[in-house]
Amino acid sequence: MKSFRLCLYTLCTAIVACILPTTHADESKDPAVLVIVLDGLRPDYITKDLMPNLHKLAKQGVLGKNHTAVIPTVTRVNSSSIATGAYPCTHGILGNTIYIPEVEPTKGLTTSNYKNLMKIDETLDGQLMTAISMGEHLEKAGKEIFVVSSGSTGSAFLLNHKVKGRGIINVEMILPESRREAVLATLGPVPEDASPNNGRNAWAVNAFFMELEENGLPDLTYMWLSDPDHTAHKYGIGTPETNRALKLVDKQIGRIVKKRTSEGLEERLNILVTADHGFSTAIGGIKLNEILKEHGLDKGVINVANGLYVTTDDEEQKLKIIEVLKKEPTIGPIFSRLGHGTLSPSSIHWNHERNPDIWVTANWNDDKNEYGYAGSTMTGGTAGHGSLSQYDISIPFIANGPAIDTSKSTCHSMTNNTDIAPTACKILGIGPSISMDGRIIGSILKDPNVQKQYSSSASWSSTPQKYPEYIATIKRIDIFTQKPGDNYKYILFGTASRSGKPDFRNTQN
Ligand SMILES: [Zn+2]
């Protein structure tokens, strides 16, 4: 009897649902922003042939010609910067692996696993990040964030580390946990990890569509798709496998744009597309531990992603390390607070109390790989990122939607991943948070008052040349706004020269 009643109830509910006109849960007219991060996307991947949907989205919107990743050009540093609008000097996530001695005094902790991040946040009394996240900032403004991701649990967690708003749906982590069962029941099991990672990327896009259906459009969505990075690390740039990954992830862009139209969201939803870093072909290089050992300089040195924490506190040892490293041709710009030809961490917005004593980056050049893609770094593996190469720093930026001024098809102004959060705030009608370092990209917005606030000028910077055997240079462009003291420093690349002359490269500025 009980089961009959239950059946009858289910049947009646189904009939009522069929009779009633379908209404969307969301009747709002408020603007919304969807930030799509395609992991490791190089600007030169966006061609009509490889990525027709993204190419079209750029054509019908604005294409940022001079967009840049945050240094270090690695995934979780940039996910933190996209989430906070701040540089590492403010948010404190200095690399993909970080050194938090309060949690683990003898080695670095990978940020790819969210459980490590939760443990750090707990140990440091909520100070995993030393900047305000968009999740927290939006909550104060009565708005909601949502994260979908096919990337690592760590990069997803860093996009909303206080699990605010609608939380996080990642292929291997759903937060809050209370949503987990229902999400998996609707979306089905997560496909196996693969290269290309199409199954998982499609699953993440489905999670966004599910959210639209069930709870309406979130004010801000961060969507992280793991290709082309996932495939390019394994197979290299320009290979058939990576090209296939690009075509497949582009199909997901096509699905999203189509959904915006079919759901009637064209007057509300702004889509911003970017990447967390570029990509370079690896040609072999730095063997830091071996170098230190060979010179008897490894005592008490903890190497965390080529950041050296010299726990002996022996100043002489530190200077000896620098002298040895300056002679190694595989090593690019070296950063420390010790001078001696090294660059200051503040020159790349990286100065934070968590800094190592010395940070070593890989050298790089403009050499093309067999498929004609320029940019090689002196690192191991097939292909990757993380250097101060222009090929790792330069990334795409595409803006398309009702708040975007499409009268100009390109934005030539320097922009950076830290600018995305403040620009999203402007579109959503709220001010930036106090910990944001980035600026509102006024020139792409329809609002003429915002556009007027910006003018730009260029400037150079390089280290003193009293170390002729090693000259490190940072190529930087500064943007000044009309507000006195507002100065935004954009890094184009960093070089290390051993020829006696600084290496400025052949760039237009
Ligand atoms: Zn990445």
Image: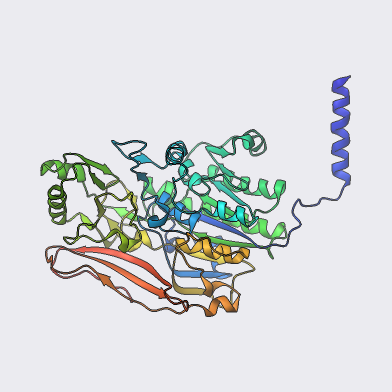
The correct choice, above or below, for 266 with respect to 362 in the image is below
Describe the colour scheme in one phrase: rainbow
Residue visible at 15% across and 44% down? 292
Q: Residue at x 39, y 59 (%)?
A: 70
Quadrant assignment for the C terminus: bottom left
Q: Nearer the viewer, residue 40 or 103?
A: 103
Q: Total marks drawn?
A: 0
Relative horizontal placement of residue 340, taking residue 447 as reference (left or right): left
Q: Is residue 505 visible?
A: no
Furthest residue toward front: 125
Residue 270: x %, y % from top left: 61, 63
Query: Residue 423 occupies which quadrant of the picture?
Result: bottom right
What residue is shown at x 56% (from left), y 51% (from top)? 136
Name the foreground residue: 271 vs 303: 303
Height in image: 236 above or below 50?
above
Residue projecting furthest to the top? 1
Whether residue 361 is visible here, answered yes or no, is yes
Q: Position of residue 482 (x, y in %)?
A: 47, 79
- Residue 314, percent from left and from top: 15, 46
Can you say which quadrant of the picture contains the N terminus? top right
From what the image shows, is residue 45 above or below residue 206?
Answer: below
Residue 333, horizontal then vertical, whole percent: 24, 59
Drawn side of residue 372 relative to residue 411, left or right:
left
Residue at position x 33%, y 63% from top?
390
